Each structure stands twice: as C-alpha cells, then as structure tokens.
Image: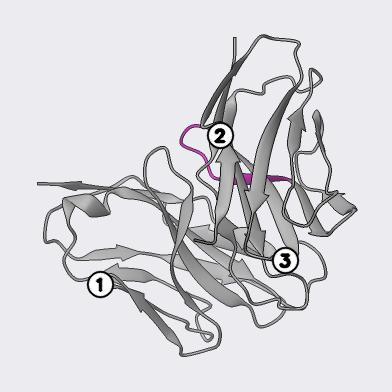
C-alpha cells in the first residue's frame, strides 16, 4: 500500500539556520504531495502542495519539489524563525485509490531557538 | 469565512460515559474525516464519510461511532467501549472522491480528557 516516510525528529535549529526535512513516499499511482504544519494545540494547516512531477510548491519561505525519480518531497527553508517551531507532516493523495486515499507521514517536530 | 468548526475545544468526561464531539463545515465538501492524535504522535484515521448517509471505518474505529445525516455535519461519539479515549481529536474535510488530488482542511481540534 501507499506510505510516507519522514525523517525522525525532533529537529533543533538556531534562528536563521537552513532547514531540510526529508520526505519519501511509496505510491502505486501518481499522487499529489502535501506538507502540513501543526502549531501547538491546533489543527493542521496546509503549508504547500505539488500535484505532478517536477512541480515546486512554495509558501511563507518554505519550498518542496516533487521528485518522481527519487520519490521524494523534501521541505526546505533558507532561514528559519522561532515562529516556525511546529510539527510538520508530509502527506500524499492517490487518485487511483477509491475511498480513503490520503496518507500522512508520522510528523517531524521542529524547534527553533533564538 | 468558510471553514471547519469543532466544539468544544476542551472536553472532560468521567470514565464510562459516552461523549459526542461536534464537527461542522461550510465549505460544501462531500468528504469528511475524523482523526485521533496522541501526544507526540501522528494522525490515525477513525472514520471517514464520502457522502451523506454513508461512512466507512478507518484504522482505529473500535469504540467510536459516527453519523452523516447532513452534508455539513459529521459528529463523532466516543463510547464507553473505547479503552483509552483521552486524546486530541481532529476533524477534516475535502472536496470529495471525484477530485482525488485535493487537500484536506482541518478544524482546530477537540482535546478530550477522561477522568
């Protein structure tokens, strides 16, 4: 079945450091890929998405490129802020699956220190 | 503003009592979902519904029940059969099965504590 794997956290960085959170996926079809962010005590918010190979999603300084050849969708940001401290979830949606076709990764907690 | 509302934000119940968590959306979405999240953990799917009057079990449906009588509402009942109900519950919605590559929109969550 489909699955999403993320790098284990927690990830701790200093303010203005470069961020990479790795995400790889397994899917039978051609999924769309997503990054969600969850701040403490809140629901998940969509951060960015990409619907086909080589698409780049971007939002709030975060970027991720859909790499079909490596089945990856790594999240990057050039300079993190304390306010970026949150849990980040990689996810996929596979249109070839009837029913529940959304799969989340386990999440990666990011802590940014001032 | 369109979105998903969950109420209440915090809920306390005594052990052995059933409790119903509310989820309402005004996004005109066909599909709705319930997830459970334990501290420091990811999301686990409890139930989902792709259309009114229809719903399917997710990975951890035991001890939970749902109904989908209206498109905008998908309440979750945590029954006394759920052995460890204390958790953070998240409701989500999406356009539906005919638009497979679409994102899920989440509510703010309900934190249930069973005393």
What's the distance in space between the residues labelled 3 and 1, CA to CA? 28 Å
The image shows residue B19, relative to residue B73, as above or below, that is above
Asked which quadrant contains residue B95, the reply is: bottom right
Q: Position of residue A54 (x, y in %)?
A: 46, 90
Q: Secondary structure at mark 2?
A: strand
Do dots 2 and 1 share one subunit?
no
Q: Which residues are magenta?
A: B38-46
Do dots 3 and 1 share one subunit?
yes
- Image disc number at residue B8: none
Q: Position of residue B82 (x, y in %)?
A: 76, 23
- Image disc number at residue A61: 1
Image point (36%, 69%), residue name: A75
Q: Which residue is mark 3?
A: A101
Q: Which residue is mark 2?
A: B110
Q: Is residue B42 magenta?
A: yes
Disc 1 chain ID? A
Q: Residues within 10 Å of mark 2 (few under 14, many from 20)?
A: many
Q: Position of residue B81 (x, y in %)?
A: 81, 20
The image shows residue B113, relative to residue A39, as above or below, that is above
Q: Residues within 10 Å of mark 3 (few under 14, many from 20)?
A: some
Whether the residues at callouts 2 and 1 have beta carbons within 8 Å, the answer is no
């Amino acid at each position: 079945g489909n699955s999403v794997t993320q790098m284990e956290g927690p990830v701790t960085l200093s303010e203005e450091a470069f961020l990479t959170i790795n995400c790889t996926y397994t899917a039978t079809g051609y999924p769309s890929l997503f990054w969600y962010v969850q701040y403490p005590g809140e629901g998940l918010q969509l951060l960015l998405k990409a619907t086909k190979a080589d698409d780049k999603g971007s939002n709030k300084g975060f970027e991720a490129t859909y790499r079909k050849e490596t089945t990856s969708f790594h999240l990057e940001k050039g300079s993190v802020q304390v306010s970026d401290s949150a849990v980040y979830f990689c996810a996929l949606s596979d249109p070839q699956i009837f029913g529940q076709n959304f799969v989340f990764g386990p999440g990666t907690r990011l802590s940014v220190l001032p | 503003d369109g979105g998903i509302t969950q109420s209440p934000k915090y809920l306390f119940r005594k052990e052995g009592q059933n409790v119903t968590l509310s989820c309402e959306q005004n996004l005109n979405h066909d599909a709705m979902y319930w997830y459970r999240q334990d501290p420091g953990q990811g999301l686990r799917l409890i139930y989902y519904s792709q259309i009114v009057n229809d719903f399917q079990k997710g990975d951890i449906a035991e001890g939970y029940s749902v109904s989908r009588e209206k498109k905008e509402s998908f309440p979750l009942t945590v029954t006394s059969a759920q052995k460890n109900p204390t958790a953070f519950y998240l409701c989500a919605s999406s356009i539906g099965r005919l638009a497979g590559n679409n994102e899920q929109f989440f509510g703010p969550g309900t934190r249930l504590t069973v005393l």
